[in-house]
Amino acid sequence: MTAYYQQIDVGSEIFDLKLDDSGRAQFGFNILAVKRDSAVLIDELVAILVAASVGVYGTTIFATSKAVIPVTEAGTSTALLSIRETGGIAPRKTQNKISPPAYQRPGAQIVVRSHDPAAARAMAYAAYVALGAIRNQTITA
């Protein structure tokens, strides 16, 4: 499936989410997409991150609240990224496109965890740059 993205706005700077249950550092940020209608936001975000070489889906990138994030051994620098939808804000309508609205505006939270805080922050930054660079592009999931 493909969707036209007017833009992805990075809604916050990267912030520290404290340690997870496994003692890993967590860094995250929020995004808001402005896009044409599609039902696969998470898949499209994964496609963007994989294309930008941020990580590999199912190995270092995980999606949805149902994803099981692997436990990593203390002392390793493996960084793991997860994406969760957050709902976003009301869609945009235009004069000629009222129903369905011209643009959806869904949101997502990106969280990266690692026992090595520098590795978590570096992966979060790579995702931040990759997603924030999306302007007037068609994304295929």
Image (cartoon, helix red, strand yellow):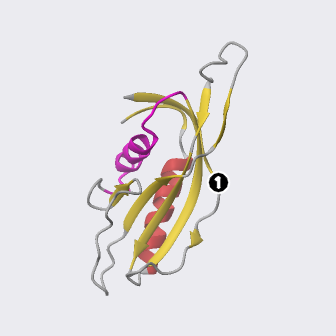
Residue type, label 1? Gly
* In this rendering, position of residue 51 left or right of residue 16: left
Magenta part of the protein: which range?
36-55
Q: How many labels does the image show?
A: 1
Q: In which quarter of the image is the C terminus?
A: top left
Secondary element type, mark 1: loop
Q: Which residue lies furthest to the top in this view?
A: 96
Q: In this view, does 50 lie above or below 140?
A: below
Where in the figure is residue 104, as x and y percent of width and height? 59, 33
**Farthest front residue in view:** 66
In front of the other: 90 or 10: 90
- Which residue occupies the foreground of this view, 24 or 6? 24
Residue 49 part of the magenta segment: yes
Left or right of 49: which side holds 90? Answer: right
Rendered view: 97 above or below 70? above
Describe residue 56's horizontal placement relative to residue 32 as left or right.
left
The location of residue 71, given as percent across then percent down, is: 29, 75
Q: Residue furthest right?
A: 95
Residue 81, by quadrant, is bottom left
Which residue is found at the position 68% from the left and 12% from the top?
96
Compared to residue 50, the image places residue 41 above or below, namely: above
Q: Measured from the top left, where is residue 74 in percent x and y?
A: 31, 86
Residue 106 included in the magenta stretch of the image:
no
Which residue is rendered at x = 63% and y = 63% of the image? 13
Dot 1 crowding, Cα within 10 Å, few <14, some 14–19, many 20+: some
Write the residue at 46% across / 40% down.
41
Residue under label 1? 11
Can you say which quadrant of the picture contains the N terminus? top left
Is 129 left, or right, of 21 in this rendering?
right
Point 46% across, 68% down: residue: 122
